[in-house]
Image: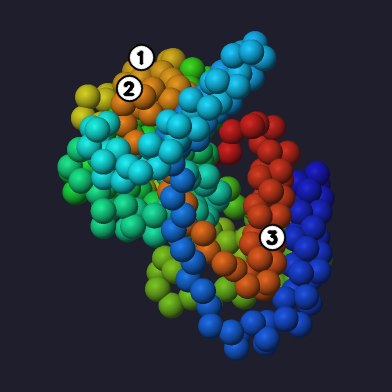
């Protein structure tokens, strides 16, 4: 009965949120449709310059007053000379460029929309001695969504451009599917890595409906069009087919990882377990133990490092839609957590 209560509260919260935002979205949707949509633009920030400025500011701040003025004057002179150099001059003097992307994954891997634009822009300008670094954070989600995200990263590998994935917090399940594409995976000591498995959880309230004399008619064309349902009565045949589908997805997941991490004992790690960074390195899931800050700061000493962001201007209805999706994701994760009594969802 606790399950039914939790499920009812969960549905009530979702419905309340959807209704609240739905009315506002409907009021402004008409006006927004008439306006041409701005597809967005790419923004590039020099992390090398940002790090250098931070170093200079700190160094000047701790100098004695009588030395500070001359240090600031010297820096301004150096900055003036640097401003005359082109990006090409800097790249040639430092031996290549590094482009940094950020991917923060949700259940739907919705950040893939920006990722594909960023990768397309980089591949149009990239050279053989350049590198792409992706700062990745994701605990996984929908199979097809993360499959697409991993395929976007594969575009970089197919052009023989060095790809590094940095994981500071978590790259699990679909997140690790993305990470394994890289030439090198760098993880923080306590980053969560792995979870090479597949999970599905479907509530069924058919018995509750029967107790209240509620019939559910489920009509399908195709023997396995619907295997398990929320409202209808599930059969053992349907359960077997559902398990078979899950095993097939798991096999595809294992094949994908094994092809890209060939030294990995896939049967040892494809159990759905997670490992923390240092342990993950021992079994071959990651290659090095560092934070992304440590890795990028070291690179910036010898290379030009640029952070690339795709900025998309969204209409007001789209912003409301994103807010609804994010709220529903949080409620879903909270509900799963209450049922499973665990902090690991995927």
Which color scheme does this rendered protein use?
Answer: rainbow
Residue 297 is labelled as none
Residue 124 visible (yes or no): yes
Q: Nearer the viewer, residue 344 or 178?
A: 178
For mark 2, what is the residue? 287
- Whether residue 224 is situated above or below residue 6 in the rendered picture: below
Instruction: Tell me where residue 334 appears, x and y as whole percent.
Output: 71, 43
Residue depicted at x 55% and y 49%: 106
Q: Residues within 10 Å of mark 3 (few under 14, many from 20)?
A: some
Give the CA distance from mark 2 to mark 1.
Answer: 9 Å
Q: Residues within 10 Å of mark 2 (few under 14, many from 20)?
A: some
Q: Residues within 10 Å of mark 1 (few under 14, many from 20)?
A: few
For mark 3, what is the residue? 323
Q: Earlier in the sequence, mark 2 or mark 1?
A: 1
Residue 8 visible (yes or no): no
Residue depicted at x 80% and y 60%: 12
- Asked if disc 2 and disc 1 are in contact, CB closer than 8 Å, the reply is no
Q: Secondary structure at mark 2?
A: loop
Q: Secondary structure at mark 3?
A: helix
Instruction: Tell me where residue 113 appears, x and y as whole percent.
Output: 45, 60
Give the CA distance from mark 3 to mark 2.
Answer: 37 Å
Depth check, mark 3 against mark 1: the one in front is: 3
- Asked if disc 3 and disc 2 are in contact, CB closer than 8 Å, the reply is no
Q: Quadrant of residue 32?
A: bottom right
Residue depicted at x 44% and y 50%: 44
Q: Is residue 1 left or right of residue 201?
A: right
Depth check, mark 2 against mark 1: the one in front is: 2
For mark 1, what is the residue? 282
Q: Secondary structure at mark 1?
A: helix
Instruction: Tell me where residue 243 appears, x and y as whole percent.
Output: 43, 48
Q: Earlier in the sequence, mark 3 or mark 1?
A: 1
Q: Nearer the viewer, residue 199 or 207?
A: 199
């Amino acid at each position: 009965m606790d399950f039914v209560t939790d499920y009812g509260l969960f549905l009530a919260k979702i419905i309340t949120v959807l209704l609240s935002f739905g009315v506002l979205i409907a009021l402004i949707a008409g006006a927004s449709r008439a306006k041409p949509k701005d597809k967005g633009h790419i923004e590039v920030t020099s992390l090398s310059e940002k790090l250098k400025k931070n170093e200079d500011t700190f160094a000047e701040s701790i100098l004695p007053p009588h030395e500070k003025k001359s240090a600031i004057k010297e820096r301004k002179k150096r900055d003036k000379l640097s401003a005359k150099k082109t990006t090409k001059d800097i790249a040639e003097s430092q031996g290549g460029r590094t482009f940094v992307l950020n991917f923060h994954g949700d259940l739907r891997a919705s950040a893939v929309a920006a990722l594909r634009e960023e990768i397309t822009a980089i591949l149009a300008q990239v050279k053989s001695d350049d590198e792409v670094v992706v700062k990745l954070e994701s605990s996984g989600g929908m199979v097809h969504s993360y499959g697409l995200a991993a395929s976007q990263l594969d575009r970089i590998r197919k052009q023989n451009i060095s790809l590094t994935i940095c994981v500071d917090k978590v790259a699990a399940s679909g997140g690790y599917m993305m990470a394994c594409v890289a030439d090198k995976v760098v993880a923080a000591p306590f980053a969560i890595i792995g979870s090479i498995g597949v999970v599905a959880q479907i509530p069924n309230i058919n018995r509750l409906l029967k107790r209240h004399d509620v019939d559910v008619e489920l009509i399908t064309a195709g023997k396995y069009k619907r295997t398990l349902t929320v409202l209808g009565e599930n059969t053992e045949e349907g359960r077997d087919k559902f398990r078979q589908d899950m095993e097939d997805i798991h096999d595809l997941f294992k094949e994908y990882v094994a092809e890209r991490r060939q030294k990995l004992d896939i049967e040892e790690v494809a159990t759905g377990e997670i490992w923390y960074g240092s342990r993950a390195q021992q079994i071959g899931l990651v290659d090095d133990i560092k934070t992304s800050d440590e890795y990028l700061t070291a690179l910036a000493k010898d290379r030009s490092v640029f952070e690339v962001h795709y900025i998309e201007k969204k209409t007001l209805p789209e912003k409301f839609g994103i807010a609804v999706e994010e709220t529903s994701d949080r409620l879903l994760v909270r509900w799963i957590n209450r049922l499973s009594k665990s902090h690991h969802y995927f």
